[in-house]
Amino acid sequence: MDPNIEKILKLPNKQKIGILVLILCLEAAALVYFLYLPRHKELNTLRTQLTKLQSEVDEKTRIANNLPKLKKEYDDLTVELERALTELPNSKEIPSLLTSITSLGKNAGLDFLTFKPKPEAPKDFYAEVPVDIVVYGSYFSVANFYAAVANLPRIVNITNVDFAEVKNANNRMMTKVNCLATTFRFLDKKEIQDDKKTPKKK
């Protein structure tokens, strides 16, 4: 028999028990360190991944449940965009639009003293088309003209309105009115690209 084992067998029972407990503790520590802790870490990692995947599933489920609503919103926005597009003319329609404005003024009883288109001002996807206008006529005619312009199917803004030379003629208040009429048009893709290439003036 191994001498070391013989020495252990000759030890008092308390020491034998102590050695046995120590051996068991070492085995338990080894099991915890080499088996339990790695498994526990792996389990926590899997739980974290599961939580993340569950969140993704919940989010995709929420989106899937909202698809009918989102589709309706998209369809509504498409209709709204198409309606907006009809309010902004393209470059070919600008001359006829300006002609319509002068016709409205003449039909309202105004005399056009000045109708001077100014250079366009390109923006992101559209351009402002300003026109200096000077008309002469009665207050009533001017009001009718502005109301008719407001009812055009195209967008036309009237700004910088200035009344001058107000006088009474044949019991009618006559005036000369200076204003700026601004309409808008969509830029085509080539115009947008050219505008991006042109260096902006500082």
Image: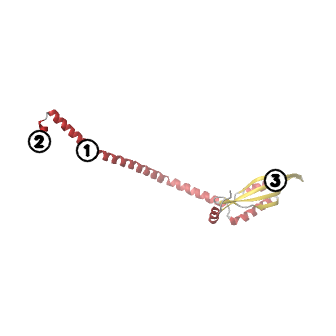
Q: Secondary structure at mark 3?
A: helix
Q: Which numbered tag is attached to residue 31?
A: 1
Packing grade of label 1 (10 A; few <14, some 14-19, many >=20) is: few
Q: Residue at x 60, y 58 (%)?
A: 79
What's the CA distance linking mark 1 and mark 2? 29 Å
Between circles 1 and 2, the one closer to the viewer is: 2
Q: Which residue is mark 3?
A: 140
Residue 37, can we see it?
A: yes
Quadrant of the image occupied by residue 121: bottom right
CA gap, disc 3 and disc 2? 128 Å
Earlier sequence position, callout 3 versus callout 2? 2
Q: Which residue is mark 2?
A: 3
Disc nearest the viewer among 3 and 1: 1
Residue 28 position in % (x across, y down) = 24, 41
Position of residue 163 measured from the top left corner of the image (x, y, whole percent): 82, 52
List x then y, in percent, for residue 184: 69, 59
Could you tell me residue 23's position as x and y percent? 20, 40
- Mark 2 secondary-structure assignment: helix
Of the two numbered discs 1 and 2 on the same chain, state the one appearing first in sequence: 2
